[in-house]
Amino acid sequence: MRFKFYLLLLLGFLTHAPFVWGNGTIRLDVKGRRIEGSPLSWTNNNMRLLARDGALWSFNPAHVRNMQKVSSRFHSYSSAEMRSGLYQEFGKRFDVSGTGHYLIVHPKGERDRWANRFENFYRSFVHYCRSRGIQTQSPPFPMVAVVFHKRLDFDRFVSADGVSITRRLLGYYSSTSNRILLYDTGAGKSNARQWQANWDTILHEAAHQSAFNTGVHSRFGSTPRWLVEGLGTLFEAKGVWDSRKYQQRTDRVNRGRLADFRRHLTKQSAGVIAKIVADDDLFQSNSDHAYAESWALTFFLTETESQKYKQLLRKTASRKPFTNYHSFERQKDFADVFGKDLTMLNARLERFIKTLP
């Protein structure tokens, strides 16, 4: 009986505008946790909810208790409300510093070290996108980044997110929690090398977070991984994350990814584009090659086919939420924008890469 009641309640949200969040707010309890948010989709076995703090929840409706509609509109928690929740979650060892678009959870006394770096990057991201004609929206939620001094604390949160723990992992953005988690390798006393590792991680992961929160990518869709990681690696170069100061093409080259791609190019040059466009398998079999190819293709397209690249971003971001993105669909969408002759496009990519100093 309870299940039927909840189903009727959800239908009131979903019938008129399926898969569109923002139509209302419900409150419910699931496995002992109270959540407020907007329903995104509902089946007999799965419910998806966008919480007011920006997190995405997915659970079996049978586990839901005490569901009620609390508002006909949806809005995020305020920065003050989210800040209070973060203090409760992380405890007395941490401070929470706010900027225009960010809330940074960091060890006490380190506001100046972290807060403005994230905010400045966000502004650089928006500036770069707009200069290329890529439309951006204002983030609907305060974006959260969490900095840990202790590897044990970082690993504990990583594990809770279901992410594989490796020594190489220094940070990541989770589209589920909508947060960046970062391990400060110098524990607040970083030397130049350690701080560079921190900064490189911030650049890459903040690019992901900014893209998913401004509509460049969709958090509700299956964006091809080369598009996601290509944009992330693009912003590792100073001429991209600080394009106002560094304006030459050579400044926009990611030297590390370029070297990786050139090493790979000598071994396997044919079909780079066709393989990475069709599926994400290379990220499982050889992640270094996958990241290098994602950067090379993205850099090539943003420098030589920026209008078409913008079209592809718009096409992938506007796909119907929570649907599989099959290989043939990925290939068709890419071909619709860039043409079917991938052999020619691949040859152009290789020639372009060879011209880079």
Image (cartoon, rainbow, N blue to C red):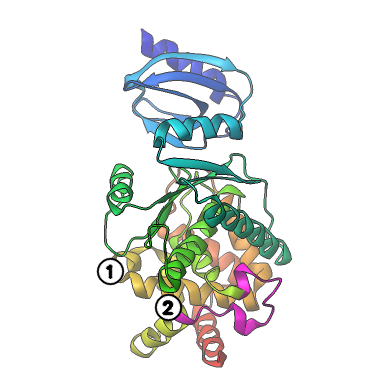
Depth check: give the residue in front, 277 or 218: 218
Crowd class of label 1 (few under 14; some 14 to 19; many from 20; radius 10 Å): few
Task: Give left or right: position of 279 versus 130.
Answer: left
Quarter where residue 302 is shown: bottom right
Q: Which residue is mark 1?
A: 285
Q: Amino acid at mark 1?
A: Ser
Give the residue drawn at x 43%, y 30%.
88
Q: Residue at x 60, y 55 (%)?
A: 116
Residue type, label 2: Val
Residue 141, given in percent of the width and then of the height, sits at 59, 39
Q: Is 173 on the left or on the right of 79, as rendered?
A: left
Residue at 42% across, 73% down:
193
Q: Is residue 91 magenta?
A: no
Depth check, front residue: 303 or 177 = 177
Q: Is residue 176 visible?
A: yes
Residue hosting label 2: 272
